[in-house]
Image: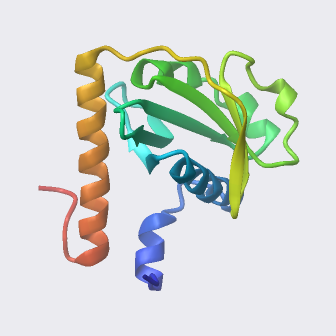
Amino acid sequence: MALDRAQLALLQDGRQSAAAFAIGRGVARLLRTHGLAAVSEVSLANGRRADIAAVADSGEIWIVEIKSSIEDFRADQKWPEYRDYCDRLFFAVAPTFPSEILPADTGLMIADRYGGEIVRAAPEHKLAGARRKAMTLRLVHTAAFRLQCAIDPDFSLEP
C-alpha cells in the first residue's frame, strides 16, 4: 500500500531528525523480522516518550532509544527511566556511530533506513503483570488511533 504525502506527514511528524527517522525505519524492519510489532513515539505513564516500543507475540515488550549523534546521546540522560516500561531496553544507532560510548547494560542495534541488526542482546528485566497490561493497552491505543488518522484525516486524537 503506497502512502500519500499527508499519510507520510503523520508518520514523520517532525519530532525527530531525518537521521533518527531513517534509523527508526530500519529498527522497525529489524523488529518485524524478530516477530515484534513496533510503534514509534509512544508516550509513557511517567511523561517520557519512547522512540520505539514493540511487543512480541509472547507479550514481551522492548523499548528502543534512537541516538542519531554523539550530541544527542550526551544531551539526553532520561533513557534509564524507560526500563520501568519494558522487558528489554536497546539503543539504536547508525553504522558510523561510536557505539563504545553507549551503556554496556543495554542492548545495541545498528540500523539504517533499509534494516538493521542486533549486535548486543539486551538484558532481560521482566515487567510486572499490571505494568505489562498497561503498556500493551497503550501500544494498542496509540497504533489504532494513528491508523484511524491515516484512514480518516478528519479523525481527531482529542475526544
Report whether 71 appears left or right of 90: right
Residue 153 visible in rendering:
no
Kindly identify the residue that appears in the image at 78 percent across and 43 percent down: 69
Kindly identify the residue that appears in the image at 72 percent across and 51 percent down: 111
Kindly identify the residue that appears in the image at 45 percent across and 38 percent down: 49
Q: At which x and y percent is residue 155?
A: 19, 70
Quarter containing the N terminus: bottom left
Q: Quadrant of residue 6?
A: bottom left
Report whether 30 appears left or right of 95: left
Quarter containing the C terminus: bottom left
Color encoding of the figure: rainbow
Q: At which x and y percent is residue 86?
A: 44, 25
Kindly identify the residue that appears in the image at 46 percent across and 65 percent down: 11
Report whether 52 appears left or right of 42: right
Q: Depth check: 150 or 90 in front?
A: 90
Vertical position of residue 20 compared to residue 51: above or below: below
Q: Quadrant of residue 114?
A: bottom right
Residue 73 visible in rendering:
yes
Q: At which x and y percent is residue 59?
A: 34, 32
Q: Depth check: 124 or 53 in front?
A: 124
Vertical position of residue 38 compared to residue 131: above or below: below
Q: At which x and y percent is residue 136?
A: 28, 36
Q: Quadrant of residue 7?
A: bottom left
